[in-house]
Image (cartoon, rainbow, N blue to C red):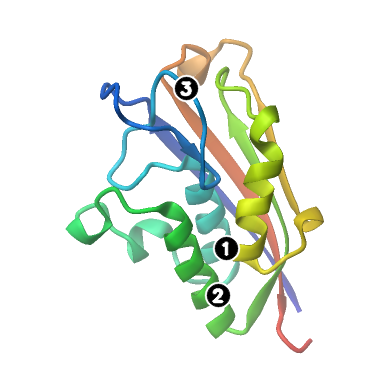
């Protein structure tokens, strides 16, 4: 048995000049980080939502509410580990994942391998089973105006032991 899940997340850029930009668990040099209760890793949030959706476990906001001070500035990679563990407890394993960053900047090409190397082990997959890519909106909408970033993710799960 297999299941597909999709996730989507959006974060505005922060006004705090000291806020780092973290994408797929990797610090990415940029003039602004993303605003959020946790580290605002928009890509890992979309990936977590895709995993939770495929396993029928709700969404990231249910598991890690932004009203809970325990998640203030939380490392989204640690949250992803908890999501993967919950998915496994429900009897599923990750087959592959595809994560898309939507925004004009930053360019993630120089960081793509580090992102895949950081997240593939968290998912329990080989690096080839995790794709990371980006696109622009041709300067349209909030991402085109440089107000923030969005991300989408799709995952395939299969029943453990199937």
Mark 1 neighbour density, 10 Å: few (under 14) some (14–19) many (20 or more): many
Q: Which residue is mark 3?
A: 30
In the image, residue 114 sits, relative to residue 59, either above or below, namely: above
| Quarter of the picture holding the N terminus | bottom right
Q: Residues within 10 Å of mark 3 (few under 14, many from 20)?
A: few
27 shown above or below 74: above
Q: Are marks 1 and 2 in contact (CB under 8 Å)?
A: yes
Which residue is pictured at 63% across the width and 45% down the height? 115
Going from N to C along the chain, the mark reached first, 1 or 3, is 3
Work out whether residue 68 can be spotted.
Answer: no
**Residue 32, horizontal then vertical, whole percent:** 39, 22
> Mark 2: few, some, or many residues within 10 Å (few <14, many ≥20)?
many
* Comparing labels 1 and 3, the label whose residue is closer to the camera: 3
Figure quadrant of residue 82: bottom left
Quarter where residue 54 is shown: bottom right
Residue 12 or 53: which is nearer the viewer?
12
Identity of the residue drawn at 49% across and 61% down: 80
The residue where tag 2 is placed is 87
Instruction: Identify the residue at the far bottom of this view.
Output: 161
Query: SS of the residue at dot 1?
Result: helix
Identify which residue, 117 or 5, lies in the foreground: 117
Disc 2, SS: helix
89 versus 94 height, above or below: below
Q: Report how far apart the C-alphas of labels 3 and 2 lie in the structure.
A: 33 Å
Q: Are marks 1 and 3 in contact (CB under 8 Å)?
A: no
């Amino acid at each position: 048995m297999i299941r597909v899940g999709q996730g989507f997340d959006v974060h505005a850029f922060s006004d705090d000049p000291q806020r780092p930009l973290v994408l797929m668990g990797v610090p990415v040099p940029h003039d602004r980080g993303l605003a959020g209760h946790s580290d605002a890793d928009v890509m890992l949030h979309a990936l977590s939502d895709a995993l939770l959706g495929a396993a029928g476990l709700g969404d990231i906001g249910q598991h890690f509410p932004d009203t809970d001070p325990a998640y203030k500035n939380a490392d989204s990679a640690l949250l992803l580990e908890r999501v993967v563990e919950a998915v496994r407890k429900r009897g599923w394993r990750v087959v592959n994942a595809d994560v898309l960053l939507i925004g004009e900047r930053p360019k993630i090409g120089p960081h793509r391998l580090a992102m895949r190397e950081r997240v593939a082990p968290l998912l329990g997959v080989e690096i080839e089973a995790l794709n990371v890519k980006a696109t622009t909106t041709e300067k349209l909408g909030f991402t085109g105006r440089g107000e923030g970033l969005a991300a989408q993710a799709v995952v395939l799960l299969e029943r453990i032991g199937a």
